[in-house]
Image: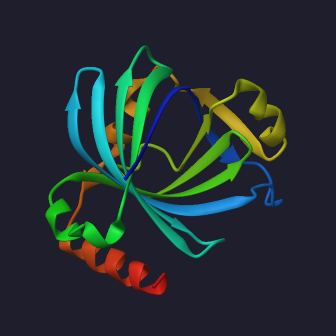
Amino acid sequence: MKKVNLTEEETKYIVNIASNKEIWNREFIIYQWYNIQDNNYESKYKLILDFLNLSLKFVKVEKRRIDAISSDKTVTYLDVNDCNFTDFIGLPFIMKRRSIKSDAHLDKFIYSNNRCSYLLELENQESINLVQNDLKIIEDVSENLDYRNINMAVQFTEEHLGQLKFLIELFK
C-alpha cells in the first residue's frame, strides 16, 4: 500500500463552456464517497476510471483543511479488488467527469445535488491562462462551503451500484 502526503491549494470557480474546442488532455470518471466529515477534516474514497489508459485507481483521501483553499492531504492507494462497493450504499457520494489540462481540473457533475453543472478547480492560479478562452468564469466560489464536493453529494443507491459494476466490468 502506497501513501502520499502533500499540501494543496485550490481555487474554485463556477464556469460555463464558452467553446467546444478540445482543450483537455486527460479525461476521467470519478466516483467519490464520503465517510467522515468533522469540522476541518474529511475522509473519502475515490474510484478513478481512466479512459485514456483503460485503468482503475482506488484511493482513500484524508484531508485536513488549513483554510478555505489550503489543506494537508494524505492519499492511500488501495486495491479495487478488495473493495465491496455494496458497503457504500447510503453514503454521500458524487460522480463526475473530470477533464485535466496542466493544473486545471474541470468537473462536470453527473450525480450531485445540481448546485452547478461545471466547477473549475485550479491548483495553480496561473493555470487559468490555459483555459480562459474556452470557459466563461461566472463566480469565484473558493471560500463558499456550498461548493465543496461533500456538500454537493447525494446518497449512493442500488441503482448507482449497478451502473458502477457495469463500468468496472468494462475495465477488466
When the figure is inspected, residue 126 is found, relative to residue 87, above or below; the finding is above
The quadrant holding residue 159 is bottom left
> Which quarter shows the C terminus?
bottom left
x and y, in percent, of residue 14 in the image = 58, 37
**Residue 7: x percent and y percent?**
51, 25
Q: Position of residue 149 (x, y in %)?
A: 39, 41
**89 or 64: nearer the viewer:** 64
The residue located at (42%, 31%) in the rendering is 73
Residue 41 placement, left or right of 147: left
Query: Which residue is painted at 37% across and 53% down in the image?
Result: 1
Of 2 and 41, which appears nearest the observer? 2
Q: Residue at x 60, y 72 (%)?
A: 51
Q: From what the image shows, is residue 100 above or below residue 69?
A: below
Q: Is residue 141 above or below residue 23?
A: above
- Give the residue at x 23% y 61%: 156
Is residue 36 rendered to the left or right of residue 20?
Answer: left
Viewer can see residue 111: no
